[in-house]
Image: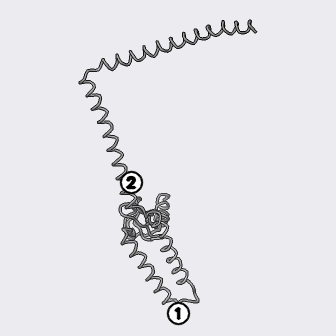
Amino acid sequence: MEKEENQTETKNPEISENQKKKLDENSTLNEAKEETEEKDIKELTPDEKIIELEDKLTRTFAEMENQRRRFEKEKEDAFEYGGYSFAKEALNLIDNLERSKQVLENDEKLKGTDALQKTLEHLNIINKDLISIFEKNNIKSIESLNKKLDPNFHQAMMEIEDDTKEAGTIIQEIQKGFTIKDRLLRPSLVGVSKKTSKKGENVKETNKNKE
């Protein structure tokens, strides 16, 4: 028992000294670091400190202003175009009305009947009401017929031979297009004119060249 106690007593001082040595080293490093930092701070003159603070303030205010502008832009877009997706989906109502009218008008059993006439009148009233609601919300149909093809608002689906019109003139509207304020909601699907191919004249030209 006495031997064990003596061994413990001899070991503990060694451990304490090692720990103390490490603590002293860490303390020395910390002090050196603090001195370096203090030295760096002391190197700045009062004028330099003011300039540094002014620079930080300028950067902070600039970032705040940029964030404010982004917020204002997002708020304006949300207010002006918040109904964009809804309006685009609502166009399906107009498309379905047009398809229903075409189906009824092409039904041989209904042609010339009072029932067809009254049904078409009701469909036209519904269509006008929808267009009126759209226009009140700055959703307007794109004018297409007899206009030159504009790729920003019209999408050509076919070419139709027509010598009475300048090539590239819209002469058929397959599906009506719409805009919401200054943004395209969907383009008009159209057919455009092209000049007829003069096969007869080409044949005459060929025969004349052979002679």
In the rendered view, tell whether residue 17 sits above or below residue 205: above
Is 119 left, or right, of 10 in this rendering? left
Q: Amino acid at mark 1?
A: Thr
Name the amino acid, label 2.
Glu
Q: Earlier in the sequence, mark 2 or mark 1?
A: 2
**Would you say residue 18 is visible in this rendering?**
yes
Mark yes or no: residue 189 visible: no
Q: Quadrant of the N terminus?
A: top right
Residue 164 in picture, x, y percent from top left: 39, 71
CB within 8 Å, label 2 to label 1 = no
Q: SS at mark 1?
A: loop
The image shows residue 170 at horizontal and vertical percentages of 41, 67
Question: Within 10 Å of the Cα at label 1, are there few (<14), some (14-19), or many (20+) other Cα atoms?
Answer: few
Q: Which mark is residue 91?
A: none
Q: Which residue does the numbered mark 1 point to in the structure image?
A: 113
Residue name at image x 25 percent, y 28 percent:
50
The residue positioned 33% from the left and 38% from the top of the image is 60
Residue nearest the observer in this picture, 158 or 40: 40
In the picture, measured across the screen, residue 145 lies left or right of residue 58, that is: right
- Residue bearing the label numbered 2: 74
Q: 179 above or below 97?
A: above
In percent of width and height, residue 53 lies at 29, 30
Q: Residue at x 49, y 67 (%)?
A: 89
Of residue 152 and residue 71, the one placed in the foreground of this image is 71
